[in-house]
């Protein structure tokens, strides 16, 4: 089709190029060059992107939420649809996919391709393709010069997806039969070059079931211009649950292929691509890198500094409702030429090679449970970039009534609007070495409707980033108790360009579809990462995870007055009782009124109990205290790992409702002065399994001395038997995560003691330290007495000795005087 010019920068064409140094790019270095779907909010995805003949090409996917609303196989059950859709999307919306071309020398966009209308399978007119899903510049045997090849996504009534080809970037012609001659195919997910050949794989089906294929194998062509393709891998690599080949990449003189497997997790295979087809393939990764089905698919591949990086995901944004997998965030895996691998971003776990810890210190989703996809990667100016997809953008529209009660409580504590503002918008991260990652943006370039980054292109003018933003042209907005659809000027896909210093004419040009007169008007301030996104270095200890410090007396008083864990979190407590079946002993040792400091052991696990960051043993102790003293709900001086666990983050608002306060000396003193029962766990980190207590910090003794409050020691057993935990290099890993053993927990309160009876002068730090160690020894002896005969403790101990570090030694001490 003839190019349609939509944005023109007056004046001479700029021939010079931007200075693309290896400087780290922040969001302040990016400016938009297209907004609002190029002025058409139905352009929801920048589904593909490529740099060809000194210009940037972007392929779109239109109105995907309206197509999803028509879905017959388990459509989303959203009480309010995020956008307003007409009754018949095909009749009332122009769904024809588009290809846009950007000339950075003139800061100008041209619409160079719009999908044609063809005769469908049923004999009626139909759009040939609704999306241009993949792009690759490639020169095959019949190509006089490199050409731009494009893979398409076709509607079920259309003849089938195709491979298009363009020599000049303006005329795109079919270079294949519909479906490459295969029946029942809806799309070709990718195009990738290796050893002078082009590769793809068919995906989808005529019944709109995503991520399934009748042909889960790799196709190869040395001459795609002639439409010559052949199968070069066995279906599913011999595994019937490998339902799709998600991605392929050239690395280490091999072609690597990543699968989607909802049952056991993704697999990665490699071949040299020589000999007769199908080629000989070797499996190099299995069982989702030993995370299982929580790593369903290889969503992205990228080669960076002699290693292959893998981005993982669970389908449907991180929660597979069809197969009941998730929700869980994606991971980053690093694969080496010798087939060894590292966990870069993800969940610590036990594998055949031992305990693996995330090299970056980040848990799944870069410590963000809403980052369901590690969607796309690119290398630019010596750095690796990773774009995510976040389902936080959909929070206002989801059906919370079907969520587990404890998870619903978390979101409602935060407030849906607050959670949407905080969690909405995708992330973009970068690294120069693969281990140390920095955020570029963690809010969709300031737009919570940018729910994903689907495409990249490294260009001489900067890094181009294409977003997914289906929240246009209108979006549902709550007005009190009612919803209404309003125009959304920030709905629709966006394209951003980043460089240390973009050219003046690009900065001055109006982005296509923009309201403001220049790109410069959209410049963002440098990002100051919120504390809950800070990386946690393995071995760095709990202090690296701290998110809050000393509160002044007024906020502490307000928290104490508002906090009521029994009333604010009944689902969480009920779940704790049902799962843990606790037996409580020694409540007669707990005074029924007045100030009181309960000092408990801390057999914490990396994944807290429920959806809120309170471990099971702490919940049970708080529940027992609440039922014993119902008129004065207990408060919790929470260690940093409870308040800042990256897998289950909790807002300050939710923490206050539950009575969680950062464990500091001043905060503890303030709470005790309110004559409340306060729970604390003074170990310098979680106990080493099974139940080996670490040395105590001294603050608890000082706060009790200053407030003249009795201390009631408490020991809680069950955590290290329900969860088999391995402590390795200061980091703890659950090997049966999500599948706790059925164990009856015990919460035992011991006779109270007073610090002042043992330490006459709080300035005598040696006496304070001796008191802390003596109390720890007393509690450890009680634990040792009680674990005798608990057979799962022996299993936990053998696991720790085999895979973990040695438990810290105990120091003998004299008995502690007690008072009643």
Image (cartoon, rainbow, N blue to C red):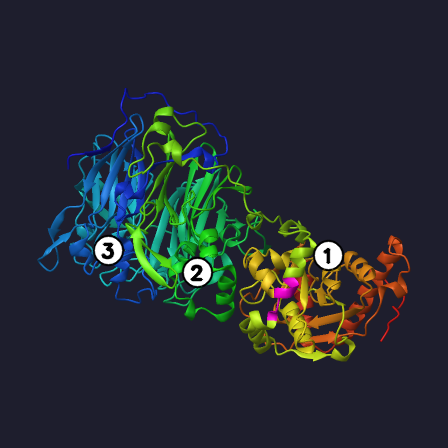
Q: Which residue is mark 1?
A: 684
Q: Quadrant of residue 622?
A: bottom right
Binning the other alpha carbons within 10 Å of mark 3 as few (below 14), some (14 to 19) or many (20 upward) gives: many
Q: Is residue 206 left or right of residue 268?
A: left
Binning the other alpha carbons within 10 Å of mark 1 as few (below 14), some (14 to 19) or many (20 upward) gives: some
Q: Is residue 728 left or right of residue 26?
A: right
Mark 2 vs mark 3: give the one in front: 3
Percent x, y of residue 485: 30, 56
* Local SS, label 1: loop
Q: Is residue 95 visible?
A: yes
3D distance between C-alphas at marks 2 and 3: 24 Å
Q: Nearer the viewer, residue 750 or 710?
A: 710
Binning the other alpha carbons within 10 Å of mark 2 as few (below 14), some (14 to 19) or many (20 upward) gives: many
Does label 3 or label 1 sit earlier along the sequence?
A: 3
Q: Which residue is mark 3?
A: 186
Does label 1 or label 2 sit earlier along the sequence?
A: 2
Q: Nearer the viewer, residue 620 or 512?
A: 512
Q: Which residues are magenta?
A: 559-565
Quarter of the image where the C terminus is located? bottom right
Q: Is residue 646 left or right of residue 552?
A: left
Q: Is residue 562 magenta?
A: yes
Q: Which residue is mark 2?
A: 265
Q: Compared to 626, does 181 lie above or below?
A: above
Quarter of the image where the N terminus is located? top left
Mark 3 vs mark 1: give the one in front: 1
Q: Nearer the viewer, residue 460 or 141?
A: 460
3D distance between C-alphas at marks 3 and 1: 56 Å
Q: Is residue 798 left or right of residue 434?
A: right
């Amino acid at each position: 089709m003839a190019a349609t010019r939509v944005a023109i920068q007056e004046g001479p064409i700029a021939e010079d190029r931007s200075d693309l140094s290896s400087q780290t790019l922040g969001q302040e270095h990016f400016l938009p060059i297209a907004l609002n779907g190029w002025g058409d909010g139905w352009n929801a995805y920048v589904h593909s992107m490529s740099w060809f003949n000194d210009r940037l090409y972007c392929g779109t996917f239109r109105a995907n939420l309206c197509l999803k609303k028509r879905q017959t196989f388990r459509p989303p059950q959203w009480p309010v649809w995020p956008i307003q859709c007409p009754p018949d999307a095909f009749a009332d919306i122009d769904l024809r996919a588009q290809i846009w071309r950007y000339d950075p020398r003139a800061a100008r966009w041209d619409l160079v391709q719009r999908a044609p209308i063809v005769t469908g399978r049923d004999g009626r007119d139909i759009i040939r393709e609704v999306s241009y899903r993949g792009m690759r510049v490639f020169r095959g045997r019949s190509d006089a010069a490199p050409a731009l090849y494009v893979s398409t996504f076709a509607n079920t009534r259309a003849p089938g997806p195709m491979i298009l080809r363009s020599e000049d970037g303006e005329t795109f012609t079919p270079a294949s039969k519909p479906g490459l001659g295969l029946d029942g195919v809806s799309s070709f997910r990718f195009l990738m070059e290796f050893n002078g050949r082009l590769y793809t794989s068919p995906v989808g089906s005529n019944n709109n079931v995503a991520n399934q294929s009748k042909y889960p194998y790799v196709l190869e062509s040395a001459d795609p211009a002639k439409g010559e393709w052949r199968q070069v891998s066995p279906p599913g690599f011999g595994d019937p649950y490998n339902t799709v080949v998600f991605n392929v990449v050239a690395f280490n003189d091999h072609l690597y292929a990543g699968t989607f497997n909802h049952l056991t997790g993704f697999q990665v295979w490699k071949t040299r691509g020589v000999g007769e087809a199908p080629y000989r393939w070797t499996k190099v990764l299995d069982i989702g890198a030993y995370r299982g089905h929580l790593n369903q698919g290889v969503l992205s591949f990228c080669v960076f500094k002699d290693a292959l990086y893998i981005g993982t995901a669970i389908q449907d944004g991180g929660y597979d409702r069809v197969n009941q997998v998730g929700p869980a965030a994606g991971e980053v895996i690093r694969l080496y030429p010798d087939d060894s691998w590292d966990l870069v971003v993800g969940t610590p776990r036990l594998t055949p090679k031992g305990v693996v810890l995330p090299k970056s210190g980040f848990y799944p989703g870069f410590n963000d449970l809403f980052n369901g996809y590690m969607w796309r990667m690119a290398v630019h100016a010596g750095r690796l970039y990773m774009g995510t997809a976040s389902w936080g953008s959909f929070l206002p529209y989801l059906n919370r009534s079907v969520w587990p009660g404890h998870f619903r409580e978390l979101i409602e504590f935060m407030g849906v609007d607050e959670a949407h503002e905080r969690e909405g918008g995708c992330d973009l991260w970068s690294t120069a070495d693969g281990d140390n990652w920095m955020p570029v943006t963690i809010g969709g370039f300031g737009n919570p409707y940018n729910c994903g980054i689907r495409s990249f292109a490294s260009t001489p003018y900067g890094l181009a980033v294409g977003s997914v933003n289906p929240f246009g042209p209108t979006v549902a907005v709550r007005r009190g108790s009612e919803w209404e659809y309003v125009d959304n000027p920030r709905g629709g896909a966006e394209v951003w360009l980043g460089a240390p210093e973009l050219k003046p004419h690009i900065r001055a040009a109006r982005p296509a579809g923009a309201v403001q007169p220049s790109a410069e008007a959209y410049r963002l301030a440098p990002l100051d990462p919120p504390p809950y996104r800070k990386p946690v270095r393995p071995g760095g200890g709990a202090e690296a995870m701290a998110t809050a410090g000393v509160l002044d007396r007024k906020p502490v008083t307000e928290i104490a007055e508002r906090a009521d864990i029994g009333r604010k979190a009944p689902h969480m407590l009920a779940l704790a009782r049902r799962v843990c079946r606790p037996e409580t002993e020694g409540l007669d040792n707990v005074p029924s009124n007045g100030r009181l400091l309960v000092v408990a052991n801390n057999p914490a696990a990396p994944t807290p109990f429920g959806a809120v960051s309170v471990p099971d043993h702490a919940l049970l102790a708080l529940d027992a205290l609440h039922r014993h003293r119902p008129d004065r709900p207990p408060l919790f001086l929470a260690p940093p790992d409870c308040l800042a666990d990256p897998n289950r983050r909790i807002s300050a608002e939710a923490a206050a409702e539950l009575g969680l306060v950062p464990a500091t000396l001043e905060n503890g003193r303030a709470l005790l002065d309110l004559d409340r029962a306060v729970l604390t766990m003074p170990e310098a980190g979680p106990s080493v399994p099974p139940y080996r207590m670490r040395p105590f910090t001294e603050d608890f003794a000082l706060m009790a001395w200053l407030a003249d409050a009795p201390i009631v020691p408490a020991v809680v057993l069950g955590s290290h038997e329900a969860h088999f935990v391995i402590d390795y290099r200061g980091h703890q890993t659950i090997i049966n995560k999500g599948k706790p053993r059925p164990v009856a927990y015990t919460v035992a309160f011991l006779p109270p003691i007073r610090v002042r009876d043992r330490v006459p002068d709080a300035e005598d730090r040696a006496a304070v330290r001796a008191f802390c160690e003596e109390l720890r020894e007393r509690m450890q002896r009680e634990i040792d007495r009680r674990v005798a005969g608990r057979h799962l403790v022996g299993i936990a101990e053998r696991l720790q000795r085999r895979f973990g570090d040695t438990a810290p030694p105990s120091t003998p001490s004299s008995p502690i005087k007690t008072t009643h």
